Image (cartoon, rainbow, N blue to C red):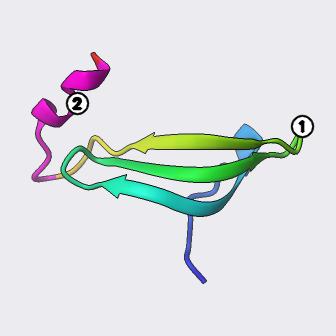
Amino acid sequence: MKKYPDFTNYGYQISKELGRNLQGGRITYLAKSLTSNRQVVIKEFRFALADGSWSAFKAYQ
């Protein structure tokens, strides 16, 4: 069983990882809203990577 980040304090429970872009520091998850029971997509940004580069984040500026 994979260990996913805990987003329950924000009202979401992750069910699986959809993709990851390690160069850009992004991981995308499929999750469920705990209030509406609807599926949502969560994109987690990990800025604190030692070898990360801001060039991969330009699409989000």
Going 52% across and 61% down the picture, which residue do you hit? 17
Residue 38 relative to residue 49: left or right? right
Place of residue 58 in the rendered image (x, y in percent of width and height, measured from the top left): 19, 24
What quarter of the picture does the C terminus occupy? top left
**Residue on which the image places disc 1:** 36
What quarter of the picture does the N terminus occupy? bottom right
Whole-number angstrom distance, CA of label 1 to CA of label 2: 31 Å
Going 73% across and 44% down the picture, which residue do you hit? 9
Residue 27 relative to residue 49: left or right? right
Q: Check disc 2 and report its element: helix, strand or loop.
A: helix
Magenta span dominant secondary structure: helix
Q: Nearer the viewer, residue 7 or 57?
A: 57
Going 11% across and 39% down the picture, which residue do you hit? 53
Residue 51 relative to residue 46: left or right? left
Going by the numbered disc 1, the residue's amino acid type is: Ser
Q: Check disc 1 and report its element: helix, strand or loop.
A: loop
> Is 25 colored magenta in this rendering?
no
Going 85% across and 45% down the picture, which residue do you hit? 34
Going by the numbered disc 2, the residue's amino acid type is: Phe
**Residue on which the image places disc 2:** 57
* Numbered badge on residue 10: none
What residue occupies the far bottom of the structure in this picture? 1
Tell me: residue 54, above or below residue 2. above
What residue occupies the far right of the structure in this picture? 36
Q: Which of 5 and 59 is in front in this view?
A: 59
* Crowding at mark 2 (Cα within 10 Å: few <14, some 14-19, many 20+): some
Magenta-drawn segment: 50-60
